[in-house]
Image (cartoon, grey):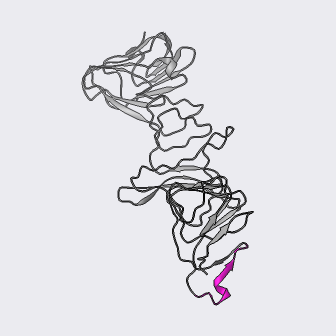
Amino acid sequence: MACNCKNTVTSFLGGDVANPTTFLNCGEADGTYNNPLETGKTQCIAENNVLRILDTYKISGTVKNSGQIVFERTFTGDTDSWEEWNNDGTYFRPIKQTDTKLSAQTLDTSGYINAAGSITTGTHDGSDILYVNRFNSTYAYGHIYGGRSDENDPVGLRFVTRNTGGIAQEAFTLLGDDRKATFQGNVVVSGNNTTLNTLSATNVYCKSVITASTVSAKYSGVTIANATDTTFAMTTATFRPGMVVEFDMGAGSGDITVELPVLADWYYGKYTFLFAATPNAISNFVINGAGSEKFYGMTMCLDGNEIINGADTITFGAGKTTSGTKVEIISTREDRMMMYITSNSNKADITPS
């Protein structure tokens, strides 16, 4: 069934053309040519016309397509029985075919390119790029669709990379139904990350401030020891609101002074200070506000409660950050910091000033 015929077409109104074929009087072509197409020549397929290619199509020039190019392959085998053939509604094609390849330097088409098999673009380390142009001015994106038409089945997208051993590994998937995106590796965002609905994560590490209506996650924290006299100027970049900070006042003999972040950076945020270890008897602990913000709240001690009303500083006497002491600090937009201290010491051991 291999077609080795050659025809000359002088007036082409559409239909099937066997290859190789000579086309004449094509307005966009630069003369008469044969297949294979020579370097510098232009072959054009007019609108509604069909060019059928058998087995191999070698192009050294340029192909301009406004119609359709159909690639067929030679069937090798027994053709005596009609059972070896399948009618697809347009052409009779063999069920079993021998694969061949299309070799070209340039393929310029304004119509569809339909390929039943896999498509490989570029060569390894060939500096080749796959470009997808803008769809239109209204939808100003390069569009990549999952699936050609509606088959009443979900079609997602899956991006697979290769490691240094050449092993294919799933990197990123998009589900067809709920469009859920799954990343197999780390997600690094260099700019702002805006989440309109719920963000669920096991661990979130952020070098900047997280701004949201509600943040629900596992707590994060840090332990600070009094090896030497130390002053901590807290910032929201290092101490994120919501953190638990544990102070070990028995690790050394130093005093610790904490300066809270500027209030405007952590409105409605909260810090919790915990003291689990037995303190050194000579170590002091001081909490200072930032700027003009004042502390308001209460100290709950063994011998009663004491109101904190507009204090700038909270000072624990030497050795009075007893094991089990807790300090909760909550910011408000009224330039106030609400402070609640629970301590096993006495009121006189904790001084608002």
Quarter of the rendering containing residue 162: bottom left
Q: Residue 343 sits in which quadrant? A: top left
Query: In front here: 244 or 124?
Result: 124
Magenta-drawn stretch contains 86: yes
Residue drawn 69% across and 38% down? 138
Where 54 sits versus 246, above or below? below
Magenta extent: 78-89
Q: Nearer the viewer, residue 245 or 92?
A: 92
List x then y, in percent, for residue 57: 54, 66
Let me know if residue 70 appears in the view: no
The answer to whether residue 196 is visible is yes
Q: Residue at x 51, y 68 (%)?
A: 101
Quadrant in the picture for the C terminus: top left
Quick check: 2 left or right of 105? right
Residue 98 location in percent, x, y?
53, 77
Residue found 53% across the figure and 35% down from its top: 193
Q: Position of residue 123 (x, y in %)?
A: 43, 56
* In the depicted structure, whether residue 8 falls above or below residue 228: below
Labels in figure, total: 0
Please state which of residues 194 and 236 is positioned toward the viewer in this rendering.
194
Near-viewer residue (47 or 182): 47
Q: Is 71 included in the stretch rendered in magenta?
A: no
* Residue sitting farthest toward the right: 13
Q: Could you tell me residue 265's position as x and y percent?
A: 50, 21
Q: Quadrant of the N terminus?
A: bottom right
Corner quadrant of residue 248:
top left
The relative height of residue 328 versus residue 140 in the rendered view (above or below) is: above
